[in-house]
Image (cartoon, helix red, strand yellow):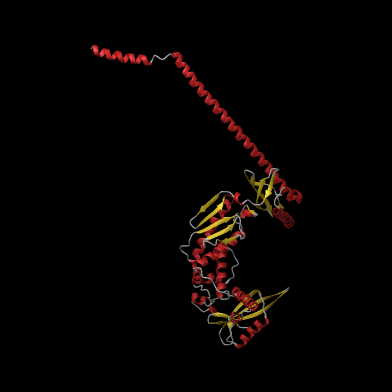
Amino acid sequence: MSRIRLEWNVESQKIDKSDSEDPIAKRARRRRTLRLIMLIGVVLAVLTFGVLVVRQRLLDVQWQLEQILRETVRAETAALRIGDINTFLAVQDSESETWRQRQQSAFREYSDIKARHDVDLTGAILDLEIDGQRGRVVVEEIINGVRYAQVWFYRNLGDGWRHVSPDFSFWGEDRRLESDDISIRYFGLDERFAQATSEVVSGWLRRGCQILRCDSAPKLTIDVVNDSAQPVSWATESPANLQVLSPSSGRASIDSPFDQTRRDLVAGALAEYLISLMTDGRQVEYPHDAVYLRQSLAAYLVRQFLDADGGDTLVDSLAFLYGDEKVAELVDHLAPAASIAVLQQIIGQPLEESNLDWRDFIKWRLNTEANLIESGAEGDLLSLYDTGDEEVWQTAYQRYRTKTVFRPRAVRDQVIARAPDGSPQLRVTVVKDAGESADEELVLFNLVDGVWKRAN
């Protein structure tokens, strides 16, 4: 028992020793710790306050820069509205004479537009962005009730904002819009245009492949570029990469981002792309009928894309009478030197019984004839005539020798009849362009080996 008590005493002494710190020293240590925490808190508060002051100052400066830029834009649009060229030029970049000359032309263009149209230069700012000493402003214009947007670029040159040439590096961040059919690469400024284009062109691709039976067309890439000499063009490095000039590079429709002009151009490019895809890139050879057939095929596809009326080509009548599947077959049979005889093979009956509309084809043929006479291509010219008839051959050669040409304004009526030898003959009424008056002429074509050949 005495041993147990001894160990307990030892432990008790240890505990008493740990609790023996001077209370005054303990309070002093706590006060020092509290002062340090308070000092740190004060320093943090001062730093936070300083950051807030600097941030607010920067915001104030930014706000002032924005207000000055807004006033500059209002002054510029007001000068355009009232026709004050001096005030307008005072806002332009004086360091670039090329830019000032360009803006002088722009001022005259605005004057012409105001003279011919109902123009409201509202000066309304639809979007404004400042990056350092450069600014970008989207300004509203209303022409004949249609709202447009113009993108203007400015730079703070020390004495205020000045309108400068387009800054292609200030078009917004790189973006990409993906769908099953196409991939669109664009900049932030063209967001609405990219979305509208993606939806429309995807539908066109599906419709085109439905007509031409292209089950696995490669994915199309569209690059919306801000600097290009052509509004729509194919990239040289890729056959499936279409480059479209940004509408923000000029006067852009606000309510229709994918405007009609670009729709027409993109539809035409897409039609050519699909035909080239289905023909393995084969080119047609002039002056063979294949040139016309390819042009007519593309025109037919464009009208299908745009849901447009007025199709009066040979291919339109082929699709109407025999179905889209015959259009696909025609593309499959489109050899470089194909003649119009390929249609008889496709529809399975003689051309004189086909009820096809030949008027647009005949117009192309007569224009081709005029081109061949002017260029001195005697052999190609004679190939368009029924030279088995000596009189027809003499007529063709006489036209070639005397350079007698006419270009038809229109081809009106067509009648399938019989030539004196009983063979099929196409008789068309051609309206010749003769200055202020228009003369009509009856032109005859004999069917020779499945091809219409001129017979008078």
Residue 311 position within the rendered picture, expressed as x and y whole percent measured from the top left: 59, 68
Residue 122 position within the rendered picture, expressed as x and y whole percent measured from the top left: 70, 48
Q: Which residue lies furthest to the left in this view?
A: 1
Residue drawn at the location 70% of the way across and 77% of the way down: 439
Q: Is residue 156 above or below residue 46?
A: below
Residue 408 position within the rendered picture, expressed as x and y whole percent measured from the top left: 66, 75
> Is residue 84 visible to the viewer in this orientation of the structure?
no
Q: In which quadrant of the rendered image does the N terminus lie?
A: top left
Q: Nearer the viewer, residue 251 or 202?
A: 251
Residue 148 position within the rendered picture, expressed as x and y whole percent measured from the top left: 65, 52
> Is residue 189 visible to the viewer in this orientation of the structure?
yes
Q: Is residue 198 above or below residue 343?
A: above
Q: In which quadrant of the rendered image does the C terminus lie?
A: bottom right
Q: Is residue 361 above or below residue 127?
A: below
Residue drawn at the location 56% of the way across and 28% of the way down: 45
Q: Count the marks.
A: 0
Residue drawn at the location 50% of the way across and 78% of the way down: 349
Q: Nearer the viewer, residue 171 or 73?
A: 171
Question: Hey, which quadrant is residue 111 in on the image?
Answer: bottom right
Q: Residue furthest top?
A: 2
Q: Which of 204 and 153 is in front in this view?
A: 153
